């Protein structure tokens, strides 16, 4: 089997599907290859937080990227629903970053000052104000950073919406097709060898998350990245107990539809094991009960783990391969894959279509690899 496309995307997570959507939207003939099912790895394991101001808390290119991507969700929700019928369940009821120790208070207040200087909406609220807003929270907090613009989505539905929208616009998406190798000739990828046969494309995009390093290793490129397992669990409550998403230094609690609470996540580096450990689960439960005592009486639903791609400097890789002219890479989003997916799709399409890129893109290029080894 041999078929040719304008763009071949390797990896069917949220960023691969977002890229397929934006490229298809621009008129490209796109093939996306996924070795399992769409959204089968980190994209379905995520809590779906859009924590532009809580996950990224200092000025710089990543903060700019995160803010821009977050701003795209209100328009993206109806756009994807019209194309696919899928509601990505965007909720924008804000986030509270709790502080329990004096040093945490100082750190949070410093972050607030930085973000206010950058024009972002963030304020310190006292313990009494926190408990007035979220009365089910435990009394131990000293206060919180109030982030009204952060929110969350359903990550699995978002990924499937991107994929279905891409298909609607003409893309081919093949599940259970594993990429064996990328064949290079004269500094270009001329063939993608898969379990189903060979494909060729004018441009190749690797969006395989924590598995991107393996795919690229045969091309003389060793990404300074590593997998980080995040363990999570969910519970069901009889009635709503939270409105805001809650974030602490040890866990987060995200209120979903149907009185469901998602609690995460541990950080276990350098493993591809998706097993959930008793120790990891116990630490999350302990912190969750301290944060939200009512959770102790909730009905346990399930546990899971996702493997997230972290890089040597904490910044994603978004750019062209240093020597292979038609190979593009979008990986290393770590805990921000869902948040960054809209802008990642747009930037991948811009790179391939040759349109102007924002200045902050220099910070995410692959030429920095030699400094991270």
Image (cartoon, rainbow, N blue to C red):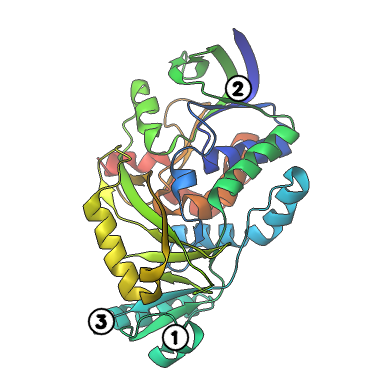
Q: Which residue is mark 1?
A: 130
Q: Vertically, is 13 above or below 336?
A: above
Classify the position of the N terminus by image quarter: top right
- Is residue 354 visible to us here? no
Q: Are marks 2 and 1 in contact (CB under 8 Å)?
A: no
Outermost residue on the top side: it is 1
Q: What numbered label is drawn on residue 204?
A: none
Q: Earlier in the sequence, mark 1 or mark 3?
A: 3
Residue nearer the viewer, 279 or 351: 279
Q: Which residue is mark 2?
A: 202
The Cα–Cα distance between marks 1 and 3, rounded to whole angstroms, is 15 Å
**In which image quadrant can residue 265 be found?**
bottom left
Q: What numbered label is drawn on residue 101?
A: 3
Judge depth for marks 1 and 3 and give the one in front: 1
Please give the name of the residue rendered at 69% of the width and 55% of the height, measured from the top-left corner.
77
Q: Vertically, is 264 above or below 110?
A: above
Residue nearer the viewer, 304 or 78: 304
Please give the name of the residue rendered at 38% of the width and 27% of the height, measured from the top-left corner.
216
Q: Are marks 3 and 2 in contact (CB under 8 Å)?
A: no
Judge depth for marks 3 and 2 and give the one in front: 3
Q: Vertically, is 247 above or below 84?
A: below
Mark 1 Cα shell of 10 Å, populated few (<14), some (14-19), many (≥20): many
- Secondary element under disc 2, as helix, strand or loop, is strand
Mark 2 Cα shell of 10 Å, populated few (<14), some (14-19), many (≥20): some
**In which image quadrant can residue 101 be found?**
bottom left
Q: Are marks 1 and 3 in contact (CB under 8 Å)?
A: no
- Is residue 226 visible to us here? yes
Rendered location of residue 168, percent (x, y): 74, 35
- Secondary element under disc 3, as helix, strand or loop, is loop
Rendered location of residue 311, percent (x, y): 33, 46
């Amino acid at each position: 089997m041999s078929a040719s496309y304008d763009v071949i995307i390797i990896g069917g997570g949220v960023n691969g599907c977002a890229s397929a959507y934006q490229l298809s939207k621009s008129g490209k003939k796109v093939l996306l290859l996924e070795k399992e099912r769409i959204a089968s790895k980190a994209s379905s394991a995520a809590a779906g937080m859009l924590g532009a101001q809580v996950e990224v808390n200092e000025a710089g290119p990543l903060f700019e990227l995160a803010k821009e991507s977050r701003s795209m969700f209100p328009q993206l929700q109806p756009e994807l629903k019209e194309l696919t019928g899928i509601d990505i369940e965007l909720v924008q009821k804000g986030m509270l970053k709790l502080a329990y120790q004096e040093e945490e208070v100082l750190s949070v207040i410093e972050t607030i000052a930085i973000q206010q200087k950058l024009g972002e909406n963030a304020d310190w609220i006292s313990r009494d104000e926190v408990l007035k807003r979220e009365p089910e929270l435990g009394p131990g907090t000293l206060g919180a950073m109030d982030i009204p613009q952060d929110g969350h989505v359903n990550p699995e539905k978002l990924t499937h919406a991107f994929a279905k929208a891409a298909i609607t616009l003409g893309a081919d998406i093949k599940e259970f097709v594993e990429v064996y190798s990328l064949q290079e000739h004269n500094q270009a990828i001329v063939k993608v060898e898969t379990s189903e046969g060979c494909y060729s494309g004018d441009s190749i995009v690797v969006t395989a998350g924590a598995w991107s390093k393996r795919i690229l290793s045969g091309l003389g490129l060793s990404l300074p990245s590593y997998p980080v397992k995040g363990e999570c669990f969910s519970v069901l409550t009889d009635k709503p107990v939270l409105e805001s998403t809650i974030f602490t230094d040890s866990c987060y609690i995200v209120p979903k539809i149907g009185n469901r609470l998602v609690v995460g996540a541990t950080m276990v580096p350098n493993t591809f094991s998706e097993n959930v450990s008793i120790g990891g689960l116990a630490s999350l439960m302990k912190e969750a009960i301290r944060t939200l005592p009512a959770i102790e009486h909730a009905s346990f639903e399930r546990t899971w783990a996702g493997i997230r791609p972290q890089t040597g400097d904490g910044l994603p890789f978004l750019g062209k391969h240093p020597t292979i002219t038609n190979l593009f890479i979008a990986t290393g989003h770590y805990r921000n894959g869902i948040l960054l997916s809209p802008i990642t799709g747009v930037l991948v399409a811009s790179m391939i279509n040759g349109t102007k890129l924002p200045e902050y893109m220099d910070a995410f290029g692959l030429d920095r690899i030699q400094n991270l080894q």
